[in-house]
Image (cartoon, rainbow, N blue to C red):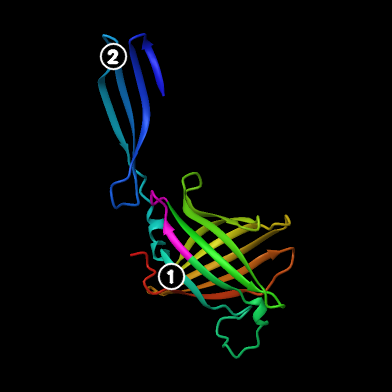
Amino acid sequence: SLRFLSADVAVEDGEVKVTPPGSTSAHTGHFTALWVRQAGAWKLAGLRESRIDAAAAPAQLADLAWMVGDWTVVDEPAGRQPGETSATPQAGAADQPAMEVSVRWDEGHAFLVREMRVVRRTPSGQSAAAHITQRIGWDPLTRQLRSWSFGSDGGHAESTWTREGDTWIARASAVMPDGSQTASLNLYTYDGADRCTWRSLPTHVGGEHLPQVTMTMVRKKGGDGR
């Protein structure tokens, strides 16, 4: 922005964004420049710059850094309870989606960005893909970890995250494309290496309770973001 203090004096305020060579993160800042016109030419009489440092992610969000990387679902039994084996009768394969998950930090390390792709097989053998984008971050208003998810089908959800021992619990409320609402508990238990058990326990689906879903995710080789 530019404002004139007189016909020959102007103040310029602006922002600058600098990305160092070879880096994917940028530095941002403000500047104020004082311009003076002398003998018909504008000259820079003064310049002030200030850097804007990104707010450090709270420890609670840093504890989720293990999520960064590329993951694939290697087992997704429909409704299997803990302790059941693969021999337990399950729903048909058409009901079991394949999922790929990619997680990264945003530029300012303020949010974890999760991209999820779910492929479901229909009874006719066709595949239908759904994409979900989720951001996990610290909410300074509620002083809690929260996430916001948006689906390619128009659905959206919000979750509040808490930790209990080795398990993260995301209490989610969602709005489906048809306007119906659901609620669920999503439990993420990380083994400290490259495997995560992800359980979803619906708490309200149109007034009815559905069986829980258990998914075992394995980090892809070389997919740890390093």
Circle 2 sits in a helix, a strand or a loop, which is it? strand
Question: Residue 216 appears at what percent x and percent y?
Answer: 51, 76
Residue identifier under label 2: 41
Q: Quadrant of residue 10?
A: top left
Quadrant of the image containing the N terminus: top left
Say if the magenta span includes residue 97.
Answer: no
186 up-or-down from 20: above or below: below
138 up-or-down from 198: above or below: above
Circle 1 sits in a helix, a strand or a loop, which is it? loop
Answer with left or right where residue 150 lies relative to residue 18.
Answer: right
* Tag in front: 2 or 1: 2
Answer with left or right where residue 27 lies relative to residue 156.
Answer: left
Q: Which residue is at 38% across, 73% downward?
A: 192
- The type of residue carrying mark 1 is Asp
- Label 2 with label 1: CB-CB less than 8 Å: no
Residue range in magenta is 102-110
Q: Quadrant of residue 208?
A: bottom right
Q: CA distance from mark 2 to mark 1?
A: 66 Å
In the rendered image, the residue lying farthest to the front is 40
Residue identifier under label 1: 166
Q: Earlier in the sequence, mark 2 or mark 1?
A: 2
Q: Which residue is at 33% across, 10% downward?
A: 8
Question: Residue 139 appears at what percent x and percent y?
Answer: 48, 48
- The type of residue carrying mark 2 is Ala
Question: Residue 131 appears at what percent x and percent y?
Answer: 58, 62
Question: Residue 160 appears at what percent x and percent y?
Answer: 53, 56
Q: Check disc 1: other Cα within 10 Å, few if <14, some if 14-19, many if 20+.
A: few
